[in-house]
């Protein structure tokens, strides 16, 4: 299948839509990373200005798949050709780069939580989410950490970025399903990662008493993993320290096991959509998606389906 790929580059007040000249690109979304990542190399027309780039958008088959700010930019002119090399993070990266003022917010949902903090450009939020009795900011809580705490208390689900810049705390009811079989795949495999797994957490109470709260990881014990942590009292979970410790254990197991599939082309697949491989009876959630393309090799999609505390 042939695909169209274009790059929107915002140079200050000027916007250039580069519909031809793609040398290569790599777009990544990941279940626990609150932004999309793009790296791209593009030949540009001669009238592209040598000016500061303020935003980047990637379109595949006319649909925006990434919109963010540049983290690095290089523009080089060689004779009659101009080569743009760019790396970009989605605008939702601002959620982890901004801290909230200390304090407690009561009777809060996702939209009111977002409205209580800084306004971030081009970031959208899932509407009509449940209300929880509090979210507590303390000692440099980031906007994303506040959303994680809220989401787990509201739905038990770890939040993620849908589309290119929309924060969701649960999958949509009309989820998509990508169906294939092994004859279409370039490869399939398995992956595991035990490097982050915590076996035990000990937490002080509000008065600083050591060992007041303790949580252990049975998976770590079964697999002879010993990685202990001791933390001060966690005011973000001030009313439920047990749930706060369980979150830390669960998060440490992120991406611990995964099925991996790669196929040619690009589909409208998003995080938490289901991947079904019919002839091996596999069904899993898309937890990491990398779309790569080049003029020489075309486009491929690689998907990891995690099996951990938050992904089936």
Image (tube, helix red, strand yellow):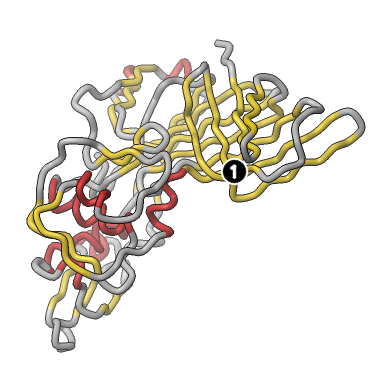
Residue at the (81%, 33%) spot, across then down: 82
Question: From where the camera sits, is residue 38 visible?
Answer: yes
Q: Position of residue 292 (x, y in %)?
A: 57, 31
State the residue in front, 218 or 139. Answer: 139
Residue at the (11%, 43%) spot, across then down: 130
Residue 4: name its quadrant.
top right
Please indicate whether residue 154 sits to the left or right of residue 178 in the image: left
Count residues near mark 1 (Cα–Cα under 10 Å), then give few for <14, some for 14-19, many for 20+. Answer: some
Q: Position of residue 221 (x, y in %)?
A: 24, 66
Total numbered circles: 1
Q: Is residue 266 above or below residue 149?
A: above
Q: Position of residue 47 (x, y in %)?
A: 78, 28
Split into 4 quadrants, where in the image is the C terminus?
A: top left
Residue bearing mark 1: 54
Please indicate whether residue 164 sits to the left or right of residue 153 in the image: right
Please indicate whether residue 28 sits to the left or right of residue 171 in the image: right
Q: Position of residue 279 (x, y in %)?
A: 34, 18
Q: Dot 1: what SS?
A: strand
Split into 4 quadrants, where in the image is the N terminus?
A: top right
Residue at the (56%, 40%) spot, across then down: 55
Residue 145: name its quadrant.
bottom left
Question: From where the camera sits, is residue 245 visible?
Answer: no
Q: Residue furthest top?
A: 1
Q: Residue furthest front?
A: 13
State the residue in front, 223 or 196. Answer: 196
């Amino acid at each position: 299948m042939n695909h169209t790929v274009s790059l929107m580059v915002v140079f200050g007040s000027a916007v250039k839509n580069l519909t031809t000249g793609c040398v290569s690109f790599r777009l990544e979304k990941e279940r626990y990373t609150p932004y999309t990542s793009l790296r791209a190399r593009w030949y540009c027309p001669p009238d592209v200005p040598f000016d500061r780039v303020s935003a980047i958008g990637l379109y595949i088959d006319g649909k925006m798949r990434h919109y963010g700010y540049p983290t690095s930019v290089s523009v080089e002119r060689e004779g009659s050709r101009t080569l743009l090399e760019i790396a970009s993070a989605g605008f939702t990266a601002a959620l982890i780069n901004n801290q909230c003022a200390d304090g407690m917010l009561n009777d809060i949902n996702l939209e009111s939580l977002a409205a209580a903090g800084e306004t971030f450009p081009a970031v959208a939020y899932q509407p009509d989410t449940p209300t929880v009795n509090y979210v507590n900011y303390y000692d440099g809580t980031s906007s994303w950490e506040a959303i994680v705490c809220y989401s787990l208390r509201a739905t038990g689900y770890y939040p993620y970025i849908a589309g290119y810049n929309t924060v969701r705390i649960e999958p949509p009811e009309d989820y998509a399903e990508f169906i294939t079989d092994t004859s279409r795949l370039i490869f399939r495999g398995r992956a595991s990662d035990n490097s982050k797994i915590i076996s035990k957490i000990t937490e002080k109470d509000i008065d600083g008493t050591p060992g007041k709260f303790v949580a252990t990881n049975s998976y770590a014990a079964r697999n002879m993993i010993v990685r202990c942590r001791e933390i001060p009292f966690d005011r973000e979970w001030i009313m439920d320290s047990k749930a706060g410790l369980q979150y830390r254990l669960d998060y440490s197991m992120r991406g611990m096991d995964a099925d991996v599939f790669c196929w040619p082309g690009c589909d409208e697949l998003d995080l938490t959509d289901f991947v079904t491989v019919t002839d091996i009876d596999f069904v899993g959630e898309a937890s990491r998606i990398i779309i790569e393309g080049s003029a020489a090799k075309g486009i491929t999609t690689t998907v990891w389906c995690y099996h951990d505390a938050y992904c089936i």
